Amino acid sequence: MPLVLPTMEPCYFCECALAGPASWNFIARDENVLVLLNGRQYETGQCIVLPVRHAPTLLELSDEEGAAVMRAARRVANALVEAYSPDGVLLYQNNGVAVGQEVPHFHLHVVPRRVGSTWEGGPPQLAAVIAGEKAAYRDYAKITEDKLAAVALVQQRLKSGPFI
């Protein structure tokens, strides 16, 4: 079952890749990845790393593109730590409309986080963690039948593919 993706024609990130340094938010590019400043600065310095080739989600990335994105994200995170001395660095990525993807082109957010910032808990899913909610499914220390079933199911699926 394919993921429901946002519609956007033309793709904004493909346009940024074509524009290169002419794009207002251009930071860096190589043959595989592009780094942009996020137009929504929930945290000062928030960047986006994306493949140059149009790939709508993580599921469409090649292994080489995935590795290139992570190498670039690590370099961007180091640059952000040097530039802003944040309290932490958050990486997040959405696949599909149901989880907040707005541009149908894979992109990884690299965010320098600060305690007490105006973004508060950051992405909505972090708010519950910061608030200290400890429902069994959110408590890492509580082992539940659902968690064990999820481990078994994912292990089974991975064994049927090239990963293991």
Image (cartoon, rainbow, N blue to C red):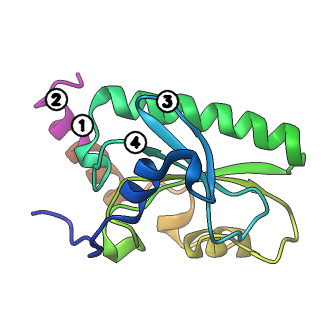
* Residue at which label 2 appears: 159
Q: Which mark is residue 155?
A: 1
Decide which of 129, 13 is in the foreground and name it. 13
Q: Are the residues at dot 4 and dot 3 in contact (C-beta closer than 8 Å)?
A: no
Of helix, strand and loop, which one carries label 2?
helix
Q: Is residue 138 above or below residue 22?
A: below
* Number of residues whose C-alpha sits closer than 10 Å to that of mark 1, classed few (under 14), some (14–19) or many (20 or more): few
**Measured Cα–Cα span from mark 1 to mark 3:** 35 Å
Q: Amino acid at mark 3?
A: Asp
User: Badge 4 local density, few (<14 within 10 Å), some, or many (20+)?
Assistant: many
Query: Sequence-wise, which precedes: disc 3 or disc 2?
Result: 3
Q: Earlier in the sequence, mark 1 or mark 3?
A: 3
User: Does residue 155 show up magenta in the picture?
Assistant: yes
Q: Residue furthest front?
A: 22
* Residue at image point 63% right, 57% down: 25
The spot of residue 133 in percent (x, y) is: 64, 75
Q: Is residue 70 left or right of residue 130?
A: left
Real-space CA distance between mark 2 and mark 4, rounded to the nearest whole angstrom: 28 Å
Residue 108 screen position, x and y as percent: 50, 51
Provide the secondary structure element on which disc 1 rests. Answer: helix
The residue at which mark 4 appears reads as 51
Type of residue at label 1?
Gln
- Magenta range is 154-164
Q: Are marks 2 and 1 in contact (CB under 8 Å)?
A: yes
Q: Considering the numbered disc 3 on the image, is that residue within a helix, a strand or a loop?
A: loop
Does residue 10 show up magenta in the picture? no
